[in-house]
Image (cartoon, rainbow, N blue to C red):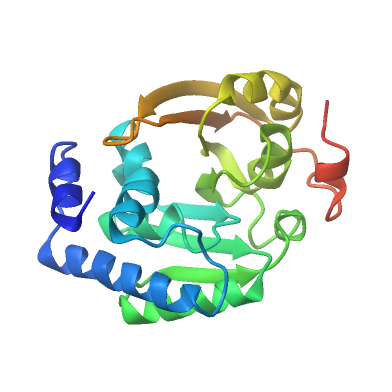
Amino acid sequence: MNPEQFRIALQEKDIELSGKQMLQFSQYYEMLVEWNEKMNLTAITKEKEVYLKHFYDSISAAFFMDFTQFHSICDVGAGAGFPSIPLKICFPHLKVNIVDSLNKRITFLNEVAKELHLSDVAFYHDRAESFGQNKLHREKYDLITARAVARMSVLAELCLPLAKKGGVFLVMKAAQAEEEIQSAKQAITVLGGKVAEYFSFQLPIENSERNLYLIKKTKETPKKYPRKPGIPNKQPIE
């Protein structure tokens, strides 16, 4: 998917990109490739693949959800900025916070924000477990996003504590997501969430499977969650 195909594909989904936004995506791509030579940000570096598998894929949630209803987003384990930076480019009104455990990624994202002139973005070098216990961030966000970070039962403990009551936790997964969601149902309930909607689709061109789960935050997360760093992964809630 080249940049023009990307623009047309989004247009078909009622997302119109201006010349400025197309330039921002181009700058983002160039920085990703440049910085990737110094640090491991992504295994995908060819332009057509980045536009499809990173940019288009990140924005795909907006095909099923109205992003104008959200104001604050927290992206957990965003790595090189996916999905939140492409979403921010498309929907500039969003206030985006990203938390990642690797400081070099945070350095990269700060430079991206500066180069692309993105406002209302903030980056935090922290473990998601610690971040979720921070009163400045706990239960403060309209939308929490996570893209292929960990298995669902672990993700739920890292992400749901950050969503405000009535907020949404958006899980983006490739294949075999249904099995994961079934095994995570107990964890989701314990943490104050409920699976509200599910969407499955295929990425264009390569026709690979994608799954989106919308988990609604229906009640406050018990104070003991998330547990200390490393424990959710070693001992998932069952």
Residue 61 coordinates in the image, percent (x, y): 37, 38
Q: Quadrant of residue 99?
A: bottom right
Point 60% across, 56% down: residue:
77
Q: Position of residue 232 (x, y in %)?
A: 82, 43
Q: Is residue 111 left or right of residue 207?
A: right
**Vertical comparison of 143 with 3: above or below:** above
Residue in view at x 40 percent, y 62 percent: 45
**Residue at position x 64%, y 45% in the image:** 159
Number of disc labels: 0
Location of residue 114 in the rendering, given as x and y in whole percent from the top left corner? 38, 81
Question: Which is nearer the eye, 102 or 205?
Answer: 205
Image quarter for residue 192?
Answer: top right
The correct choice, above or below, for 23 with respect to 141 in the image is: below
Residue 96: x and y, percent?
A: 45, 61
Horizontally, residue 102 falls left or right of residue 15, namely right
What's the residue at 16%, 69% (across, down)? 20
Q: Is residue 56 above or below residue 165?
A: below
**The one of 139 and 184 positioned closer to us in this rendering:** 184
Left or right side of 104 for 234: right
Quadrant in which the C terminus is drawn: top right
Q: Is residue 124 left or right of residue 128?
A: left
